[in-house]
Image: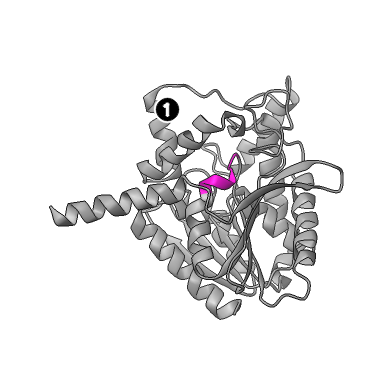
């Protein structure tokens, strides 16, 4: 009975952490060079250095409060922002529930401009600057680093969207996405969201084995429904295939000087983990950590055993490469 009480208390503490904006953290706005307003989050730390934490498609800052708290607890100042077109950073389509993007170049430019402004804010301060990015964020981070727009002291890429998984394969999947984007409105949703329990359960299993952490999304959206984003547009899917293919073939990968830790879920049902492994093999300074059937796409929002292993890998990597 005592053991069960301790476990329940730990679960409640974890839930409170995931569903509470921490004291000392603030939300504000950041304006891109073209005037687009982005929703920004900052939590000053104990002076060890600074980490920019970026999520994936349709993500919001709140989904990462648990990992942000872990990093902050180790002395890091943590910053994040919602990508253009999602969360609290506006929309790129007439339908506010469709995640649209014709070209990822605008998102890469946003990341580069934010990084330059963010690092300028810390001019004269000691400590490294690190980029941690998940899924689509990892894709954009790689592009920004290859373009020289972002030059972190170290980078952590979690389930990076080097390619997207398609039952038709990448070549046919890209052709189909392109054809459907050219037919009708390219900003229309690529699929419909069915409000039934079977569909909700399927999505949960693709993202994480942790039912409790998956539930955090609905909890936050229930309080801030304007942050909710649904499926991507056909234009977004087309661009994900196109940009991923270009990224995988980029010869500059072999010369990327940034130390990279890459966390990959081998059985990821959303992104192409094999493509991520092939890309990792081309990087000159990379540490690769792989997870098996115990992890779905959201490695940092998985059950405790997976998360703790991921945290340990991140902490060790940053202790060594971003001291």
Q: Position of residue 189 (x, y in %)?
A: 63, 25
Closer to the camera in the image, 13 or 51: 13
| Coloration of the structure image | one colour
The reply to whether the magenta stretch includes residue 160 is no
Q: Which residue is mark 1?
A: 199
Examine the rendered structure and indicate whether residue 165 appears above or below residue 313. above
The reply to whether the magenta stretch includes residue 60 is yes
Residues in magenta, as a range: 58-63
Examine the rendered structure and indicate whether residue 197 appears above or below residue 323. above
Q: Quadrant of the C terminus?
A: bottom right
Question: In the rendered image, which quarter is residue 114 located in?
Answer: bottom right
Q: Which residue is pictured at 49% across the width and 66% down the height? A: 73
Q: Which residue is pictured at 60% across the width and 39% down the height? A: 58
Q: Position of residue 315 (x, y in %)?
A: 49, 71
SS under mark 1: helix
Residue furthest to the top in view is 184
User: In the rendered view, does 60 fall on the left or right side of 198?
Assistant: right
């Amino acid at each position: 009975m005592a053991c069960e009480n301790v476990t329940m208390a730990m679960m409640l503490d974890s839930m409170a952490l995931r569903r509470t904006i921490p004291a000392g953290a603030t939300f504000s706005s950041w304006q891109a060079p073209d005037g687009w307003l982005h929703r920004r989050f900052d939590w000053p730390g104990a002076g060890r250095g600074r980490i920019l934490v970026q999520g994936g498609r349709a993500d919001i800052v709140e989904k990462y409060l648990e990992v942000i708290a872990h990093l902050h607890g180790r002395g890091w100042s943590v910053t994040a922002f919602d990508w253009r077109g999602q969360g609290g950073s506006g929309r790129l389509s007439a339908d506010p529930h469709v995640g649209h993007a014709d070209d990822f170049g605008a998102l890469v430019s946003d990341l580069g401009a934010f990084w330059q402004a963010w690092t300028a804010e810390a001019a004269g301060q000691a400590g490294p600057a690190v980029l941690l990015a998940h899924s689509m964020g990892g894709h954009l981070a790689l592009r920004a680093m290859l373009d020289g727009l972002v030059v972190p002291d170290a980078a952590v890429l979690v389930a990076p969207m080097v390619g997207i998984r398609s039952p038709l394969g990448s070549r046919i999947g890209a052709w189909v996405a392109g054809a459907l984007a050219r037919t009708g409105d390219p900003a229309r949703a690529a699929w419909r969201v069915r409000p039934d329990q079977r569909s909700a359960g399927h999505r949960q299993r693709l993202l994480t084995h942790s039912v409790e952490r998956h539930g955090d999304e609905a909890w936050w959206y229930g309080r801030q429904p304007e942050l909710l984003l649904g499926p991507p547009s056909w234009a977004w899917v087309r661009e994900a295939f196109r940009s991923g293919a270009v990224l995988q073939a980029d010869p500059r990968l072999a010369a990327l000087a940034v130390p990279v830790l890459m966390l990959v879920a081998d059985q990821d049902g959303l992104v192409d983990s094999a493509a991520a492994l092939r890309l990792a093999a081309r990087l000159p300074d990379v540490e690769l950590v792989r997870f098996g059937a115990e992890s779905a796409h959201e490695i940092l929002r998985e059950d405790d055993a997976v998360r703790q292993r991921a945290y340990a890998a991140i902490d060790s990597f940053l202790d060594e490469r971003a001291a």
